[in-house]
Amino acid sequence: MASRKIAVIIGSLRKDSFNRKVAKTLMLLAPPTLEMEIIEIGQLPLYNQDDDAAPPPVYTEFRDKLKEFDGVLFCTPEYNRSMPAALKNAIDVGSRPYGQSAWGSKPCAVVSVTPGALGAFGANHHLRQSLVFLNMPAMQQPEAYLSNIASQYEGDNLTNDSTKAFLQKFVDAFAVWVERHAD
């Protein structure tokens, strides 16, 4: 398999978020065929269509950066049974102006992470609705809903062996998915 560049988008802006910890764990477990890089989204002002004619430089930088990647890994928490506003905003910024989406056709996967019991199921599936419109082939299996995550980390180290084994299976499947669907 060829080496593929993967943008890692973390929906939580919190410095010590569990989503960031899971993303970094996945980056460490990734096979050498995936070159994964976190792309920050907290600096993006709210999308406003009035700015399409003369977008803020940060919009253009974000869109241009996304275009460099072969695929995307989304790590999202759940806020009120949906994805966080920062993640939705990043999706909107990257998809505009209409017809010029930086997301289009990039294979992707979604990991939802929560200290709660439901695995952020709502956020995972809400995000997937946007991915359909963006024409991003999303990996269906294995599904990744990580619940009770707070008890599985000591600092930045994942201590739960079964979760680590699952994440290894997930990222290996993602490498195959990206290779199969990348342009």
Image (cartoon, helix red, strand yellow):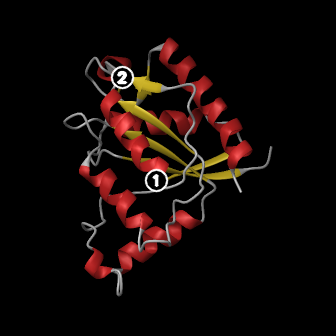
Side (left or right) of 123 relative to 71: left
Residue identifier under label 2 = 154
What is the x, y in percent for residue 167?
54, 25
Q: Amino acid at mark 2?
A: Glu
Q: Amino acid at mark 1?
A: Phe
Mark 1 Cα-neighbour bin, 10 Å: few <14, some 14–19, many ≥20: few
Residue 61, quarter of picture = bottom left
Side (left or right) of 9 relative to 3: left
Q: Residue at x 39, y 23 (%)?
A: 146
Q: Residue at x 31, y 18 (%)?
A: 148
Work out how far the residue at label 2 is from the one at label 1, CA to CA, in angstroms: 38 Å
Secondary structure beneath dot 2 equals: strand
Secondary structure beneath dot 1 equals: helix
Nearer mark to the viewer, of 2 and 1? 1
Instruction: State the mark number for residue 133.
Output: 1
Residue 45, quarter of picture = bottom left
Farthest residue in the bottom direction?
54
Instruction: State the mark number for residue 36.
Output: none
Asked if residue 58 is positioned above or below residue 70 in the image, the reply reads below
Q: Quadrant of the C terminus?
A: bottom right
Q: Nearer the viewer, residue 133 or 28?
A: 133
What is the x, y in percent for residue 163?
48, 18
Q: Residue at x 34, y 27 (%)?
A: 121
What is the x, y in percent for residue 137?
58, 45
Question: Can residue 33 be seen by looking at this rendering?
Answer: no
Mark 2 Cα-neighbour bin, 10 Å: few <14, some 14–19, many ≥20: few
Q: Quadrant of the N terminus?
A: top right
Side (left or right) of 3 relative to 51: right
Question: Can residue 136 be seen by looking at this rendering?
Answer: yes
Sequence-first tag of 2 and 1: 1
